Image (cartoon, grey):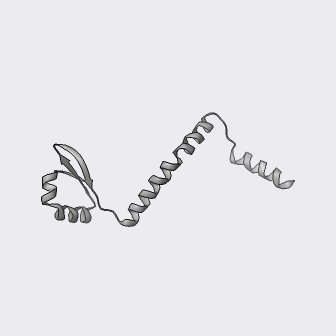
Amino acid sequence: MTQVIPVTQARRDLLKLVDKVNEEYTRVDITKKGKIKATIVIVSPEYLESLEETIYTLDHSMDDIRRAEGEIAAGEYITLEEFKKQLKKRNAR
């Protein structure tokens, strides 16, 4: 469940919010002038590192992924069975 609170309340209740998020695995969206400006979530350092690694990997792989999707759409691929046959022929030489 997400709780939405103004920044003035967040400032006043910061320690309580941290405890709440930690205990209830919830998130708190903080607003300024009625618009959400920040979100408080608590995750383990290991989980955060995993998320960061995933984002980095995706960010640096998207060009390759898009190129591969284009090749598939254009029919520029071989099936696993075809690949195995080609490999078998190469190894037989």
Give the quarter of the image for residue 69: top right
In terms of image quadrants, where is residue 48?
bottom left
Point out residue 74 in the picture as x, y percentages from the top left corner: 63, 33
Q: Residue furthest top?
A: 74
The residue at the point 82 percent across, 51 percent down is 90
Question: In the picture shown, does residue 21 fall above or below 35?
Answer: below
Q: Is residue 35 above or below residue 15?
A: above
The x and y percentages for residue 17 are: 19, 61
- In this rendering, the count of numbered labels is 0
Residue under the point 12% across and 59% down: 12
Q: Is residue 17 left or right of residue 65?
A: left
51 horizontally vs 80: left or right:
left
Q: Residue 47, image x and y in percent?
A: 39, 63
Whole-percent x and y of residue 50? 43, 61
- Farthest right residue in view: 93
The residue sitting at 14% across, 60% down in the picture is 13
